Amino acid sequence: MAVMLATGLWGLDRGGMWGDESVTFQVAQRTVPQIWRLLHDVDAVHGLYYLFMHAVLTVHPGEVVLRLPSVCAATATAGLVAALGVRLAGPRAGLWAGVLYAITPMTGHYAQEGRSYALVAAGVAGATLLLVRAVDAGGARAWWPYGTVVALTCVLHELAVPVLGAHALTLALLRVPRKVWSGWGRAAGAVVLLLLPLVWVSQGQSGQVAWLVSPGWDRVGRLARNFSPGPAGPVFWGSLLLMAAGLRERRTAAVALPLLLVPPGILMTVSQVRPLYHDRYVLYALAGASLLVAAGAGRVAGVLGRVRIKGRRVRAGGSRVRAVVGVTGALALTATFLNQLPVHRRDRSAAHRPDNLAVVSALAVSRMRPGDPVLFVPSVGRLAALAYPKGFRRVRDIALRESAPRSGTLWGREATPGQLRRRLAAVDRVWVVAERSALDPRRSRTDPVERTKLAVLATEFTVREEHVHEERVRDDVLLRLYVRRPPGDILPGDALPGDAPPGDAPPGDAPPGDEPPGDIPPGDEPPGDEPPREPADVPPPGVSDGAPALGAQTLGAPALGAPPPP
C-alpha cells in the first residue's frame, strides 16, 4: 500500500485536466438537483460517482483533490490484493501480489485519473476477498457484506457486473457445497434486481458509447500487455511464465484466473454484437494477473528451496533460504519498476493524456481581447471554458443559448442554425477553438448547428491568425482568429488547409460525426470516456485507451465528437 500511495501521489498535479476529468470536475460542482437532472439524459452510469465527487469537491475544488479518491482507491486495492494473496498462498505471495499490482503502469495511469475506474477496482478486490471469506465461513450471514460491496461497485459502474460471472466460476472450480451456492445465489440475485433500473435508464443513453468498436485479437494482445508489470521484453515474457506456474496453485488459480479472464471475455464477446468493451472497463481484472504472477513466483521459490546442494536438501523454510528468497524478490520487483520508470514518468505528463484543457485556456488568455466572440467547434470544445473559465471570462460565447448546469447537459445548449447565422452576421471577427480534424471539410456531420458553423466560416470568413501551444502539448487543438472576407474576395485561395471551402458544408448535407447524441456524451463528445491518445513516437505506456478528447489526433483518439463510454 505504501508503494501504491507513493506511486499515486508522484506527479499527481500534472497541471491540466483532460476531457473526461473536466466532465467530472464541472458536473460534481453542480447542485444535487442539477446533477439529478443531468442523469436523466446523460451519464446515468456515472451517477453515484458524480454524487460522491460532489461531496469531495465541496472540501476544495481543485485538480489534486479531484484525483485523490482514485489514488486512495488504488492504494486500498493494492492492500486488498495482498490480503487475497496472503489468504490464498501465504504472506510471501501476498506481499509480491500487492507490490506487483502497485507497480503495473496501467494501475498508476488510472490511479491518477479523476474517473471512477480505480474505485471500481477497489470494490471488486474487496468483494473477491469477501467471497473467499464467505466460502471459508460457510454461514448465511457472511454473504451480506459480499452482496453489499458488489452492489455498490456495480452501481458505481454497471460494467462491473461481469465479476459475478467470475465469482460463479470460482465457486465451481472450488467445488463448494450446495449451501454455499445458495448463499451466493441470493446475494447475486439481489444485486441484479437492484441494478435493473440503472440498466434500463442507461439503455436509453447507449448513444454515448457509439464510438466503441468490436474488439479483435489485437485488443486481446494489448490487454495482456497492459495487465503485465511490463508491456514488452523480459518482464512481459517472465510474467507469462510465472502466471503459467501459478496455475499449479489450485486455490489461488481458482480465484485469480476467473477474475482475470471472465470479465474481459464476457465484454469482448458481447461487443462482437454490440460494442461495449474498453480496457478501462475491466481494470479490476488486473488483480487476477498480479495474484497469478505472485503465486507462480512463490511456487518457483519453493521448488528452488528444495533442491539438493552437495547431497543435502535445503529446507524451504530455513532462515537462510527465506532471506535469499526475500532479497531476490525485492530485487526483482525493484528491477521491474526501474525497467518501466520511463513509462511511469511519461504517464505523469499532461501531454500524455488525450488533451490538456489548461493549455487551451492559457492560449485564450494570451490572445483574446475583452468582448471578443468565440465559437467552439464542435460544442464539446466548450469543456475547456467550463473547466478553466479564467481564459474565457472576458469573451462571449456566440453560439451558447443556455448554460450547461441550467440546461441539464454536459456543455450547454446552442442556438439554432438560423440564430447562429444572424449572430455571426453581426460580427467582423470571431475566435474559433477547434481541433484540426473538426475543421476538415471532408468529414461528414449530422448536426445542423455544426454544419452551419463550418459553412459560415468557409464562405464569409478567412483565417488571419492561428495559434497552438508552443510546446505542442496539444498541437491538434487550434485557436484561430477568423475575420470577415472583403466583398468580392476570392474564396478558394484564402483558406488554410483545415478550412472548409465555400459551399463544402451547406447546411443540410453532412453525415454524422460531430455532435453528441442529443446533448449528451457520457464521457465526452460526449466527452466523458474516450480513449486516450498516445504521441505517435511514443509506445503505449502499458495502459488502455482513454476517453474522448478535445482533439489530439496526433495521439490517436477519436475526434471531439465521439460519444463517450459508459
Image (cartoon, rainbow, N blue to C red):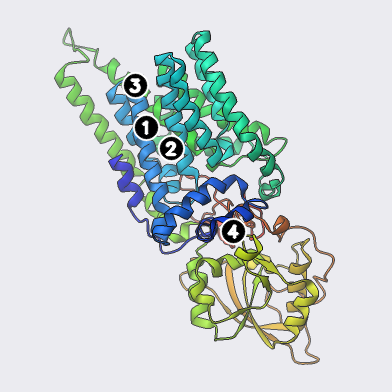
The three-letter code of the residue at mark 1 reads Leu
The residue carrying mark 3 is 87
Q: Residues within 10 Å of mark 3 (few under 14, many from 20)?
A: some
Q: Residues within 10 Å of mark 2 (few under 14, many from 20)?
A: many
Give the residue displayed 52% in from the left and 60% down from the top. Answer: 22
Give the residue displayed 50% in from the left and 31% down from the top. Answer: 150
Across and down, in percent, residue 11 comes to 35, 56
The three-letter code of the residue at mark 4 reads Gln
Badge 2 element: helix
Image height of 115 relative to 249, above or below = below
In front of the other: label 2 or label 4?
4
Q: Distance of mark 1 from mark 4, alpha carbons?
A: 35 Å
Badge 1 element: helix
Image height of 305 relative to 107, above or below = above
Image height of 473 relative to 148, above or below = below
Q: Distance of mark 2 from mark 4, alpha carbons?
A: 28 Å
The mark that comes first in sequence, 2 or 4, is 4
